[in-house]
């Protein structure tokens, strides 16, 4: 099987007791995990580990190859999906055979955040909707901050957080909405 990124380099097998069997590219450092190997590993892995915060994960360089890639197993195009959850790269998967491609260091970063046992969820519409919703929230926040300026935005944000937990929140909001007072 040839590397989907390098195209001419052959992948070689790498086995480990604690990780799924992988095919590695010595040129780009990418890893291919066959679908059945991932599911076999996931079943043996046991309980799904809780996700760790972004600041607890390892910081490694990733060259997220965004060019179209062909599956090294069946030749179909790989589908690229955002990981999200504070991770800026994409993971590629074949929708035909289910194999997964990780560019160099992507698996290690996912493992450090305990997201390596959630790979199958990354490709779900629910996961992708959550990422899209979070991106929309961040875009909206940046837009409001640009309109108000950083100082005023900070004041409004602090006030918003205070009112969110205040026992008389509804009264405060009603007072703010009443333009005649």
Image: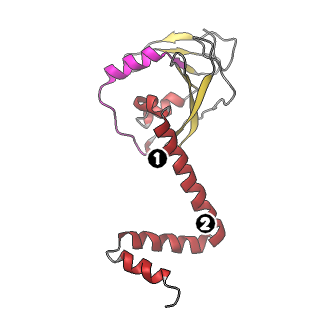
* Position in image of residue 56 (x %, y %): 43, 43
| 3 left or right of 86 in image | right
**Quadrant of the rendered image containing residue 40:** top left
Residue at (47% x, 17% y) in the render: 35
At which x and y percent is residue 65?
A: 66, 29
Q: Give the answer, above or below, for where 140 lies relative to 67.
A: below
How far from the left and from the top, in percent, is residue 172?
41, 80
Q: Is residue 20 visible?
A: no
Residue 48 pos. (x, y %): 33, 32
Residue 163 is marked as none
Q: Residue at x 48, y 81 (%)?
A: 176
Observer-nearest of 90 and 171: 171
User: What secondary structure is marked by label 2?
Assistant: helix
The residue stretch that appears in magenta: 32-54
Quadrant into which the N terminus falls:
top right
Neighbor class of circle 2 (other Cα within 10 Å; few <14, some 14-19, many 20+) is: some
Residue 50 inside the magenta-drawn segment: yes
Distance between mark 2 and mark 1 Cα atoms: 26 Å
* Relative side of 39 to 93, left or right: left
């Amino acid at each position: 099987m040839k590397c989907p990124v390098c195209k001419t380099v052959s992948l070689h097998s790498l086995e480990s007791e604690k990780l799924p069997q992988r095919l590695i590219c010595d040129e780009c450092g990418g890893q291919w995990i066959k679908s059945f190997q991932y599911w076999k590993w996931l079943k043996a892995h046991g309980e799904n580990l809780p996700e760790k915060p972004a600041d607890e994960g390892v910081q490694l360089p990733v060259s997220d190859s965004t060019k179209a890639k062909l599956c090294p197993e069946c030749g179909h195009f790989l589908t690229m999906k955002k990981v999200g959850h504070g991770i800026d790269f994409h993971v590629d998967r074949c929708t035909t055979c289910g194999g997964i491609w990780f560019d160099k260091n992507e698996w290690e970063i996912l493992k450090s955040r305990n997201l390596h046992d959630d790979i199958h969820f990354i490709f779900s519409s629910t996961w992708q909707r959550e990422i899209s919703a979070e991106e929309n929230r961040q875009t909206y926040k940046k837009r409001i901050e640009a309109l108000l300026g950083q100082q005023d935005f900070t004041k409004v944000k602090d006030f918003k957080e205070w009112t969110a937990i205040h026992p008389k929140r509804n009264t405060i909001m009603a007072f703010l909405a009443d333009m005649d007072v």
